[in-house]
Every structure is written in structure tokens, then in C-alpha cells.
């Protein structure tokens, strides 16, 4: 019983100490939450740039258009599957105080205002949560 309580306490502290970017955040707000980007991208033909961040055990890619976040992806550095509790925390952090509605048939969600969607996919051998403004 003590081990379970200790595990719950450790997980609570770990997740409460991590703050995640939200769609619509500026590059400065994202940097305040995730730190300096490990890689900064240059705008493509559409003006979209992609920055790579490392926060805790996560690799986070954030795409910006006109310096505002329009898409994010989260993957674990150890390439492990994202746990349901991690996905929930990441969605809540990115939801701008709006709820996510889960698709009962697949690992996909739509934000209650229908202005963002999220889904899980394996990219380059890494289970990844993708979140995108619509």
C-alpha cells in the first residue's frame, strides 16, 4: 500500500511540475514553458516554422505561423507508448481550458469548440500525440 501511495505521489509531482504549450501560444510563451528550443526552424513557403524542444522525458515539436502555435506533437524520449494519464495531461495543457471529446473507435479527440483535433500515431518508430488547430 505504501508503494502505491508513493508511486501516486511521484507521478502527481512529475506531472504537476511539467507545463505544456497550448495552441495559440506565442513563441515566447512556449519558450517560457518548454525552455529554449533544441532546434529552431525557419519559415517555409507558407510561413510555418517548426521548433523542437526537450522537456523532461518528452520531445516536443511546435509549429508556428506568424509566431503563434498552430500544431504540436509530443513523444517520449525512450520511445515508450504514451500512457493514458500522459495523454490526458497533454490534452488538458493544450486545450485552452476547453474539454476534449474522445472518439470511441480510435485514439483521437476533438476539442469541444471543434477548432482543434488530436490523435495518436507512430512516427519514425515513436508513439506520438499530435494536436492541431483546425
Image (cartoon, grey):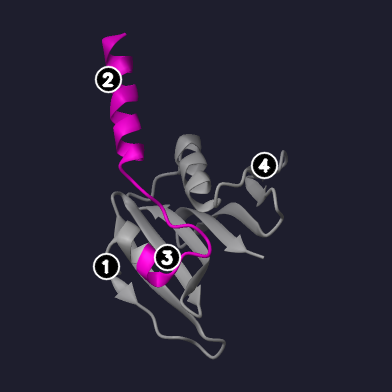
| Disc 2 crowd, CA 10 A, few/some/many (<14, 14-19, 20+) | few
The magenta region covers 1-29
Element marked by disc 3: strand
Magenta stretch: includes residue 10: yes
Mark 1 lies on residue: 36
Mark 2 vs mark 4, CA separation in Å: 30 Å
Contact (Cβ within 8 Å) of mark 3 with mark 4: no
Q: Quadrant of residue 46?
A: bottom right
The label nearer to you, 1 versus 3, is 1
Looking at the image, which is closer to me, 96 or 70? 96
Mark 4 lies on residue: 102
Mark 1 vs mark 3, CA separation in Å: 12 Å
The numbered mark at residue 61 is 3
The label nearer to you, 2 versus 1, is 1
N-term mark: 3 or 4: 3
Mark 2 lies on residue: 6
The numbered mark at residue 94 is none
Residue plotted at (50% across, 87% down): 44
The label nearer to you, 1 versus 4, is 1
Contact (Cβ within 8 Å) of mark 1 with mark 4: no
Mark 2 vs mark 1, CA separation in Å: 32 Å
N-term mark: 2 or 3: 2
Amino acid at each position: 500500500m505504501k508503494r502505491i501511495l508513493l508511486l501516486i505521489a511521484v507521478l502527481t509531482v512529475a506531472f504537476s511540475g511539467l507545463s505544456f504549450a497550448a495552441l495559440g501560444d506565442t513563441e515566447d510563451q512556449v519558450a517560457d514553458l518548454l525552455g529554449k528550443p533544441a532546434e529552431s526552424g525557419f519559415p517555409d513557403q507558407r510561413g510555418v516554422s517548426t521548433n523542437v524542444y526537450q522537456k523532461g522525458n518528452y520531445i516536443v515539436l511546435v509549429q508556428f505561423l506568424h509566431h503563434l502555435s498552430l500544431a504540436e506533437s509530443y513523444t517520449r524520449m525512450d520511445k515508450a507508448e504514451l500512457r493514458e494519464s500522459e495523454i490526458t495531461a497533454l490534452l488538458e495543457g493544450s486545450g485552452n481550458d476547453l474539454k476534449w471529446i474522445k472518439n470511441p473507435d480510435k485514439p483521437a479527440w476533438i476539442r469541444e469548440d471543434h477548432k482543434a483535433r488530436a490523435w495518436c500515431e507512430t512516427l519514425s518508430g515513436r508513439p506520438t500525440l499530435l494536436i492541431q488547430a483546425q
